[in-house]
Every structure is written in C-alpha cells, then in structure tokens.
Amino acid sequence: MALVPLNLLISHNGRSSRQHVTCRYKCGDACSKPAPNTSDNEYFGDIVKRMSRRSVLQTAGVTVLAVGAGSVLAACSTSSDTPQASSSTTPAPPETLPGMKFDAVAPNSEDAVVIPSGYQQGVVISWGDPVLPGAPVFDVTKQTAAAQRQQFGFNNDFAAVMPIEGQAGRYLLVNNFEYVTPQFMFPGYDAEAPTREQFDIEIAAIGMGVVELERTPQGGLRPVMGRYNRRITADTPFTLTGPAAGTDFVKTAADPTGRTVLGTFANCAGGVTPWGTVLSGEENFHSYFGAAEGAPANPADADRQKRYGVALEPTELLWETFDPRFDVSKSPNEVNRFGYVVELNPWDPNSTPVKHSAMGRLKHEGANIYVTDDGSVVAYTGDDERFDYMYKFVSSRKIQDPGRAFENTAAMANNMAILDEGTLYVAKLGSDIPAAEIDGSGKLPAKGSFAGTGTWLPLLKSGAGGQAESLVDGFTAQEVAVFTRLAADKAGATKMDRPEDFEANPKTGKVYVALTNNDERGAPGEAAVDAANPRNDNKSGQVLEITDDHTGTVFTWDLLLVCGDPAAADTYFAGFDKTKVSPISCPDNLAFDSHGNLWVSTDGNALDSNDGLFAVALDGPNRGETKQFLSVPLGAETCGPVVTDDFVTVSVQHPGENDDNSIDNPLSRWPEGGNGTARPSVVAVWRDGGNIGV
C-alpha cells in the first residue's frame, strides 16, 4: 500500500484534489469563476456582532469572563488539545460503537478500492455493462448511442439499493449518471470538434438507471436482467409539475405547453422516499447550455441567467452545436426546465418521471425525506454552490400507506403529489458567539463549540393543480418557483460553504448537512467567516448538525465536524480526541447505518490522499469519533454510499480523471487492471461471516 505519511498532512496550504478537467465537465468550471451569488445579504458576522452587543449589555461580567477564558484556551491549544481536554488525567478511551468496529483504513494513494482487514469487495456493475435485453458487451472502441441506451451509464453518483419484497437477496439498484468526460470515454477525442455520434452517446450516457441485483454466494451483489431494468437519459420525457408548469418561463417552441421536458442531467445525489420512489437532484445543469461567441443577449434574462451561472459562450461539450435546445440564444427558456428535484417510480418501468417545481429551481445536490409522527412530510435539500443556501419543503399532504405504497394505486397517487403541495423555506442562521471569537482561523470559541440558532424563511406556498402564493415581496409565485435563488437572496438567507447532501437521522430526527468547502470564504468582496462557516479559505469543509422543528420555522445548530487533518489546529471532531480519528476532507454525501452512526463520503480530498468513506459517531463519549472505512482509486470520487448491516456500496466516480491524462494516456486502469479501461462503477463491500462494523 502506498501510504501518505501523516506528518505530510499537517499543512492546510493545499487545495482540493479535484482536477481542472473534472471541474470543467462536472460543474462548468464554477470554482474558477466568480460566485453567482452577488447579493448584499446581511453577513452572518453582522448578526453575530449585534447579538454580541446584546449579550454584553445583558450580562457584561459573565461575557467578559467567557471571552477571556476562550482567549486563554485558544492560545494554549495544540494539535491534540480540545477545550474539553483540560484535566491532568487522561480518561480511558471509550469503547468503539457498534457499526464502527473495523480497522480504520489509512490515507493512501493506491489505484484500488482499499477496505479494512476481514472484509471482501467486488465490482457490482460498471459503465457500459448491459442493463436491458439485447445490450452488447461493452467495447470502448465500438461505442454507439443505441448500445449506450441499453447499458449502464457514465459517472454514476447517487445510488439506492432497495430490497424487492418477497424475494430474499434481490434488490433494485437505482443510480444517477451525473456527467460525461469525453476524453475519458472516447479514444482520440478532439475537444474542438466532437462528432455527432459522440454527442448522441453522451446524451445516452447520463441521466438515471434501474437495475435488478442479486446477492452472490460469496456475499457480493451482481446485476440481473430483470423486469424493472430501465435507462433514463438526457432526452427521456419528464412531466413538469407545480407552479412553474405551463408558465411562460418554461414554454419552448418544441413544448408550447411548458409541461413536458426532455431529459434529466447533472443528477448528483438523491434519496429514497418512504413510499418507494427515488428522488434525484439536478445540480450543475447550467454547464450544458451555451451559445456561439458574440450571440446576442436578451437583457430581460441576463441577471437571471447570471445568477445560475449560465453564460452566452460555448460550453465544454458543445451540445449547443448539435441541438438548438441547448443554445440559450435560440431557446432561452430551455435552461429554466432544469434544476429541479426529480422523482422516479422505479417499480413501474412505464411510468413518466416528474420534476417538482414546488421545491424550487436551484443546483440541488439531492433531496431527502423525513416523516414526523403525525405523517407530515419534510424534504431537505442543499444548493451546491459557494455562498448558496439550505432549503426545506414542508408538504401540506400527509403520507399514505408507506412502505408498500407503490402497490396501492390510490396511495401512490397521493404520495407522488406530496412534493407538489406545501411550503418552501430557506435557512437563515445566527449565533450568540461574540464576533471577535470567529476570526477566520477556525479556533474554537470560548463555549467550546460552534453553535447557534436559525430560522426557516418562507418563500413559496404551493397547492393543488399548480396554484401557488409567493411569500417574497416583489416576486410572483411562478418567479419564486423558477428563479428560486433570486427569491432566497431577497429573503435574506445565510450564505453557506457549498451545502451538498442533507440527511435526517432516522433514529433521532437530527438533520445533517455536508458543507464541502469554499476557498473563497473571507476573500475580498466575499462573505466573511461566521460561526457556521468559521474558516477563511475553507479547503476541507465541515458537517453541520441541525436540531429542527421539522414542520416549524425554528432550529438550533452545531458544527459536528470541522474537517481536515486532525493534527492541524483548525479542525474539530465534536470534542473527541483528535489523535484517535481519521483525517477527513471535503464531505459530500451522507448516509446512516442501523446503529445511528453517520457515514460520510468525500469529494476532492485536500490532504494529498484518495477520497473515501468514513463512519462518524454521533452520541455519548464517542461523539465525533471518525474512522475511514474505505478509499477509492486514483482520481476518483466516493459517491452515493449505502450502508446496511450486510453490505456497503459506493459509487466510484471518474476513476483516473486527471488533467494530464486521458483514455489514451490513462492514470488508472481500475477496475479492469492490466491494459483495461478505467470505468466508473458501483462497488460492494461485505464482511467475512458477519455484519458490517460489529
């Protein structure tokens, strides 16, 4: 194993390891451009200052003492100290929790999936593998669009593994295929002159897929040619629902009704609903839309397009040269038909998937559901961009017949409309931590943790049949649904450091948010640091914990993790001993095991080692303990973790993707090895003769 020495990981001078080629094709090179959010929202720091002044007036003596104590603790802190570790005696380390009893994988740079001792692994399915009857065996030199429509797509991200009731060891695997990187798909690719056939293959390679799986005798998973198998592509018909449907903002020459959208793409994370469907977030959709240099701009659209990162310039893929719907100068409304939460019923291969505009249009990382005791449904979603926002949608409908609803026609009809009727909110955070204690260094404040309160600000109330009411002055309901970012700007939401996956713990109801990174935090002209985003030049991100009044408008929050190398002073692991945790950087996707532990996958590790999957304890003396369960190959990102008692699966996205390499000059040969092609894949990990982590 090629280990990365820990003493080389102390400095935070490095950047995310995500390569420029990945940024160009995955997010339209968003991080190299100015952040689209130029609103003059009140900085969190201004809120802190006002709250601090009130605290000083109310409890001057106590406040001064607390600030003084915090200054002493910060000055004395070492790489292994936390404010809680002030005793002269060292307590015995707590016993590792169930679900986390495995040997931590060390940081490494292997071209392999590295797992703990005592565990086994196997590739479940890879790009190009057959999904539908008649699909040919994959041959990278003989690709066709017709073949790709029947095969597993490229750069799989989110994954759901759903048991098929009554069939032991059988599952549905539902995947997102987020984006394409043509130089890692097509031998001899010419970025200046892609071919029509390559465009057609790319259209077929992204979207979503449904594949039946079965357990193998060894304990792994393998695909089968089942009746549920399906491919969703960038030109599959979708139904647009909610306030945006049928409005002038989404009507096009090809769809004058504004209700039928062709395709989904840039699908990042997602979630499984209690009624048996799958949600998928359309994230960096903007990068598929462009125009020829010098194309005339429509002044009425300019500010709206800019807020979403859409530019009148050629795109990386040049799709606009093959299909005018991707040319914003010719079809300016087509881009408004993307950026929604998508819902797919994987149990009905003939069903038409839906785009829910009542949940707003933004760069949805994904969406995940929490159901309260009275059947109220709440969906949480993050807008994955520097300085963008966190949202929730509270449905006015109650869930019916959860679990097997897909077999109950009336219940499914009700539940498929749950995300069309309700209220959309955006988060505003505050804290009573004195502003002087949040200086951008990441030092803990005197209270020993970063914490505060928050409010959900209402944006849009939607009802049956697309009826809706705007809750933001100066915006119609239809404008809020289609240009949600601008409405959230007006409402005064808090700018966050790339809010990605957003998941509620099914055991406790607490909600967790992966804030991946933001190396522009604190830069001139950008938002200053605050208690929830406490580091300037934030390269490694953090994980936020929210205790929410799910159907209400108030919450409290804490930073569970401030990620990075534990030997660095600016990291925090909920007060757990930092000498006993795994380094973690750039949290992206979240999951929970049956024991209530949080699992975190990473994207863009800034610590000079491969990305991975980590288990994090949430309660008791182990709270903050972080252990790496696996790492993915060179150049790859860890996506879509599924953690069960029997197995763990992850999507290995863009293996070998590196600025200096291509399919003709590969960095990685995983998973085939030898002279094989690097292929995005789903991997399963299981334990010899036992359950995961016990």
Image: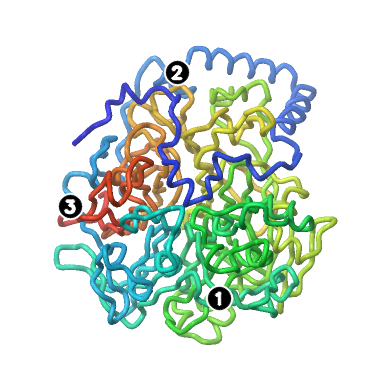
Left or right: 242 with respect to 323? right
- For mark 1, what is the residue? 238
Disc nearest the viewer among 3 and 1: 3
User: Which label number is shown at residue 675?
Assistant: 3
Tag 2, which secondary structure?
loop
Q: Which residue: 55% across, 77% down? A: 400
Q: Nearer the viewer, residue 264 or 84?
A: 264
The amino acid marked with disc number 1 is Phe
Q: Which residue: 76% across, 22% down? A: 56
Is the image coloured rainbow, by chain, by secondary structure, or in one colour? rainbow
User: Which label number is shown at residue 86?
Assistant: 2
- Crowd rating for badge 2 (residues with CA inside 10 Å; few <14, some 14–19, many 20+): few
Q: Which residue: 36% across, 49% down? A: 638
Looking at the picture, how far across and down is residue 482, in whole percent? 70, 63
N-term-proximal mark, 3 vs 1: 1
Vertically, is 184 above or below 101? Answer: below
Tag 3, which secondary structure?
loop
